[in-house]
Amino acid sequence: MRIGIIGAGSMAAALGGGWAHVGHELLIGARSARSARDLADTINAGSEPRHRVGAATIAEAIDFAEVVLLAVPVAALTELLDDHSERLADRVVIDCTNAFQPDESAPDGATAFVLGEPAVAERIASRATRARVVKAFNLLAAEVWAGEDRVFDGVRLAVPFCGDDETAMRIVADLAEDLALQPFPAGGLHRARYLEATAVFTVGLWFDGLDARAAIPPLTAAFAVAD
């Protein structure tokens, strides 16, 4: 599959590197030509992909792609969508961004976050109206996706994702499986805002030294009965 990676940071490197390694064709697009080339060179040198990863402009990466990964800071999305929303038509667009900002009310010395925007994926879909937007890969840090560990306490690491297009959802599920991850379809794109809120909440717990998993029991212990 042809994947256009928009961005050249740690998330682009983690997901792009994994997909290149299993044989997908990648083109890295970024505002900085040097950053795009450096990331492409890093992936080519480190993972021995079946297809050499190339570097290009953002427009070229989108035009090349069947699937587009938006791996840019949320602050960069407005300009990107202003310039390229029409170009994203008919592409599967994976939004892995998080609109985190510091929680100014947190006690001194505490690292805590709040959402700077309540529904990023919905904004992308409202601007790129013909794109098939799926929210995915936003719940964990890039270092986790880049790591080799995929099973924790006997359970395979999962990727919750939300979207309205069935074909796009299947494609994202396959891309998660390609990274040895367990796909968790979590409903329509209107539910992506809850996935974004979950990310800011759990990341805040982790930064505070608290194990977020302890608050959610395994399925075998989830014995609540619907009212």
Image: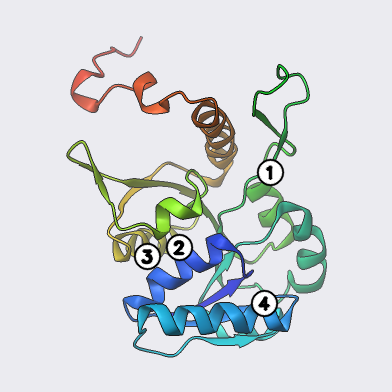
Position above or below: 54 against 206: below
Mark 3 vs 1, N-terminal side: 1
Residue type at mark 4: give it. Ser
- Which structural element holds mark 1? loop
Position above or below: 191 against 148: above
Crowding around mark 2 (Cα neighbors within 10 Å: few <14, some 14 to 19, many 20+) is many
Crowding around mark 1 (Cα neighbors within 10 Å: few <14, some 14 to 19, many 20+) is some
Crowding around mark 4 (Cα neighbors within 10 Å: few <14, some 14 to 19, many 20+) is some
Which disc is residue 175 wearing? Answer: 3
Which residue is at a point 67% across and 47% down the rendered structure image?
120
* Alpha carbon distance from label 1 to label 2: 23 Å
Position above or below: 81 against 190: below
Which disc is residue 99 wearing? Answer: 1
* Alpha carbon distance from label 4 to label 1: 22 Å
Q: State which quadrant residue 192 falls in.
A: top right
Position of residue 35 measured from the top left corner of the image (x, y, whole percent): 67, 77
Q: Kindly indicate whether the residue at mark 1 contacts the one at mark 3 (C-beta within 8 angstroms).
A: no
Camera-side mark, 4 or 2: 4
Position of residue 126 measured from the top left corner of the image (x, y, whole percent): 72, 54
Mark 1 vs 2, N-terminal side: 1
**Residue position for label 2:** 168
Position of residue 62 measured from the top left corner of the image (x, y, whole percent): 63, 79
Crowding around mark 3 (Cα neighbors within 10 Å: few <14, some 14 to 19, many 20+) is some
Mark 4 vs 2, N-terminal side: 4
Camera-side mark, 1 or 2: 1
* Alpha carbon distance from label 2 to label 3: 11 Å
Q: Is residue 29 left or right of residue 20?
A: right
Which residue is at a point 57% across and 29% down the rendered structure image?
204
Mark 2 vs 3, N-terminal side: 2
**Residue position for label 4:** 35
Quadrant position of the N terminus in the picture = bottom left
Camera-side mark, 4 or 3: 4
